[in-house]
Amino acid sequence: MLLDRIMLATGVHSSVCYLHTWRNLQMIMSKKKESFTISNLVQVYRASKQRFDTDETFKEYARKRVVELQAGEENARKTWKAICEASRIEFDQVYQRLGVSSKLEEKGESAYNAMLQDIVAKLEAQGMAIESEGALVVFDESQDKNKVPLIIRKSDGGFNYATTDLAAAAYRSQELNASRVLYVTDAGQASHFRQVFQVARRAGLVSTTISLEHVPFGLVQGEDGKKFKTRSGDTVKLKELLDEAVVRAKADLEQRTSNPDLDQDELAAAIGIAAVKYADLKVNRESNYRFSFEKMLALSGNTAPYMLYSYARIAGIKRQCADDGLFDTYGSDIALILEKDEDRNLARVLARFAPTLADLDTDLRPNILCEYLYELSQTFNRFYEACPVRRASTTELAASRASLCAATANTLRLGLRLLGIPVLERL
C-alpha cells in the first residue's frame, strides 16, 4: 500500500488487489461445500495439499476441477465463491488493522476469465503461439526451443498465470488507459514477468507507451536466518504476528510510563503495528531480512518507535509554546536564523524531502524514505539538545526554531503517512 499512496500523491488513483487465484484453490476445489470458515479452510487446504503431493489420481482430479471452474461449471463456482467469501472476511479484518484504504479495488484472476480465449486466439492468429507437448506455448523472439517458453494453455485445456497476466495487462492498457502498471510480487517471479511483458508488447496487447514494471521483494526470515515459521513449523499468520507485536509494545509501555491520561491499549496497538510495517519497509525491498520483535520495537535506531517519539517530542514543544504563539507564525514569511550548526543541519535535511520523494517515485524503494526519516529524526534530536526554542536569546530566533520544529513535524507526519504509519501526539 505504500506504492499506492505514492502513486496517489503523484496523481495516480487506481490500485488493484489481485486476489483469489485459481491455482491456490485447486486442492480445496475437490471439496464441494457452499460455506467455509477461515479455520476449516486452512485445515482443508493442508489435508488436500498433502494428498495432492502424494496421490496422482487426486492431483489429476483437482486440476480438472480448476478447468471446470474456469469454464464456469456451477458447482465449482459455488465452492469457489464460498472460499472467496471466507477469505475476504479475514482479509478485511487485517486490512482494517493495517489501515489499508477501503478504496482498494479487488480484481482477482477470475475477473479476466472471459478474456482468456480471445487472448489465446490472438496469439495463435499472429503465429506466436504454437503447440508443444500438448500445451500451447509462446517462445521468445529468438524462437530458441532450448529456452523455457511461456505456457498460455495447458495440455488439459486449462489456463494459467501467464494467460491471465496477459489478459490483465491488456485490460489495464486498453480499458483503464494506464500509463504505468506496477506488479508487486516476490523476486522469484522476475523471469515470469519478463516473459509476460515481452509477449504482451510483441502481440500488441498493450500500448507502446505503457510502462510495465515488476517491483520485486525479498523474503522474511526468522532471527536464525532460516524460513520464518512458528515453533511447530507452521507458516506465521500475519494476524498473530500483529497480535504479538501489540502485546510486546504494551509490555514495554507499562514498564516505561504510567501516565493515566494515555490509553495504553490504543498506544500499544499503534506502536506495535507501526513497528511491523516500518521493519518491513526500511530494508531494501529486494533483500531478505531477519524478523526480530526486539529490534523493531527498540526506542533507538532506525525503528518506528524512534520516529514516533521524535514526532511526539515536537508536539510536546508545541504545547509548551502554546501561550507564546511561536508556532502560530509557521508558514508565514519568517526569516530563518541559522545560528548554530544544528540549526543549519536541520534546515539542510528538511530541504532534501522533495528530492527524496522524487527518488522514491522513480526507484520504488521504500527504504529510501525510511533512511531519510531516520536521518531527519536524528538531526532533529541533536537540534533539540543544542537549540532551545522558548529560551532562545531573541524572539526572532525563537520563531525561527519553532518554524524548524513545525517543518520537521509536518515532514515526519507526511513521510510516516506515506509508509502507512499514523503519528502520535503523546507518548
Image: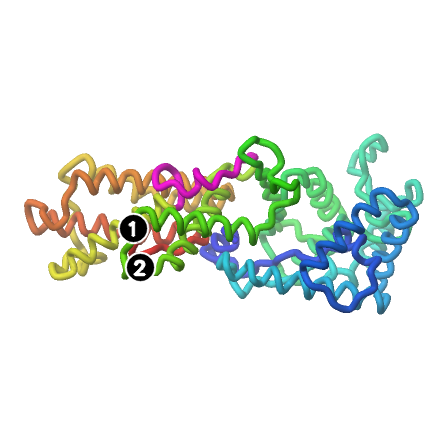
Q: Examine the structure image and report whether residue 403 is included in the region drawn in magenta.
A: no
The kind of secondary structure element at disc 2 is loop
Q: Examine the structure image and report whether residue 293 is included in the region drawn in magenta.
A: yes
Label 2 belongs to which residue? 262
Rendered image: mark on residue 413: none
Look at 43% across and 38% down and name the residue there. Answer: 295
Marks 2,1: beta carbons within 8 A: yes
Judge by depth and name the residue closer to the eye, 267 or 208. 267
Mark 2: give few (<14), some (14-19) or many (20+) Cα within 10 Å: few
Look at 72% across and 58% down and name the residue there. Answer: 41
Mark 1: give few (<14), some (14-19) or many (20+) Cα within 10 Å: few
- Position of residue 16 measured from the top left corner of the image (x, y, whole percent): 61, 58
Look at 78% across and 61% down and name the residue there. Answer: 113
- Position of residue 112 measured from the top left corner of the image (x, y, whole percent): 74, 60
Judge by depth and name the residue closer to the eye, 32 or 282. 32
Judge by depth and name the residue closer to the eye, 410 or 93. 93
Q: Amino acid at mark 2?
A: Leu
- Position of residue 15 measured from the top left corner of the image (x, y, whole percent): 57, 58
Judge by depth and name the residue closer to the eye, 3 or 69. 69
Q: Please, what is the dominant secondary structure of the magenta stretch?
A: loop
Query: What is the basis of the colouring in this image?
Result: rainbow
Q: Amino acid at mark 1?
A: Thr
Visible residue check, residue 211: no
Look at 16% across and 60% down and name the residue there. Answer: 322
Visible residue check, residue 73: yes
- Position of residue 56 measured from the top left corner of the image (x, y, whole percent): 90, 45
In the picture, measured across the screen, residue 366 lies left or right of residue 160, that is: left
Which residues fall within the magenta stretch? 287-304
